[in-house]
Amino acid sequence: MEKRITEQPSHYDHLETMSIEQLTAAINQENKSVPTAIDRALPQINVLIAAILQRLQAGGRLFYCGCGTGGRLATLDTIEVQNTYGTDGSQIRAVFPGGIGALTQTRESREDDLTDGWQQLVSCHITEQDIVLGFSASGTTPFVLATLKACRARNIATACVVNNPDSPIAAVSDHVVEVVTGPEFVTGSTRMKGGTSQKLILDMVSTTLMIRLGRVEGNKMVNVKLMNAKLIDRAARIYMERHPDENDYQSVVEKLKKSGSIKAAEEGRASLGPSKGGENELKALL
């Protein structure tokens, strides 16, 4: 354990004697080191994303595998990707100890389960087209390690994001991202810098994948799910910006609600040919 950087003593001590101001300043100072650690790992991250993208484009799937903070963040990412980019949830999925239904439970002993992860993947009919990405701050989490081992034994591509160098999980991964964030502010509490690095990398991986898969145009979420008033309003403003000839806000809102997304509304517009506004402009020019 002493070899795990994430388990080494904090650079700070006597935390209970520190003021609120001292604590927040020190935590923030530690957090500043996370982007620097990720910057050093960018070449590894780029290779990983390219490998995942190749499989998704060929019809494969990405499975996240993690426990604790990493597993919960990964599961959150699968949900947010569906909402932000209008996917159906089948392309990027998550494996969590006890299943996704156990996400809010605090039974961290399930991290030691050596069969549950693979059994969940089997129930999802995993194939050699897919890739499994494990998250583990320590690089030793039994649930993740056993799942990746089972995948590798069956020629399924494996990858990992870990916060310690030369870990057992890295040894069974085809693609390794090592983000060495150092000792935690509270010794061993990897929900802090370790978790922060995992969240940033998840954002980076899934956002890049969605862009490369055509779910973004320009810099706009043209496939966002219209789930509430805020998103409907955002979609209407984006649509009107992209199509200035349609400037009746309420009619655009109704069109989007009927279509389900900006992109679907635009495809419907294209199938109908030039808009009435466009026809009038053409007549004026003639």
Image (cartoon, rainbow, N blue to C red):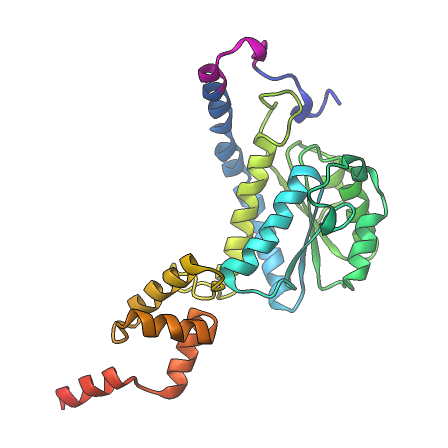
Q: Compared to 201, does 252 lie above or below?
A: below
Residue at screen point 33% across, 74% down: 251
The stretch in magenta equals 12-23
Left-right relation of 267 to 202:
left
Q: Compared to 117, does 3 lie above or below?
A: above
Q: Is 18 contained in the magenta span?
A: yes
Q: Quadrant of residue 12?
A: top right
Query: Which of 229 and 110 lies nearest the eye of the viewer?
Result: 229
Query: Which of 254 and 99 lies nearest the eye of the viewer?
Result: 254
Q: Compared to 24, does 237 lie above or below?
A: below
Quarter of the figure with the N terminus: top right
Residue at screen point 65% across, 69% down: 59
Residue at screen point 57% across, 15% down: 11
Query: Which of 48 and 274 lies nearest the eye of the viewer?
Result: 274
Q: Is 219 contained in the magenta span?
A: no
Q: Quadrant of residue 130?
A: bottom right
Query: Which of 149 and 252 lies nearest the eye of the viewer?
Result: 252
Left-right relation of 151 to 186:
right
Whether residue 79 is visible: yes
Whole-percent x, y for residue 61 in the image: 67, 62
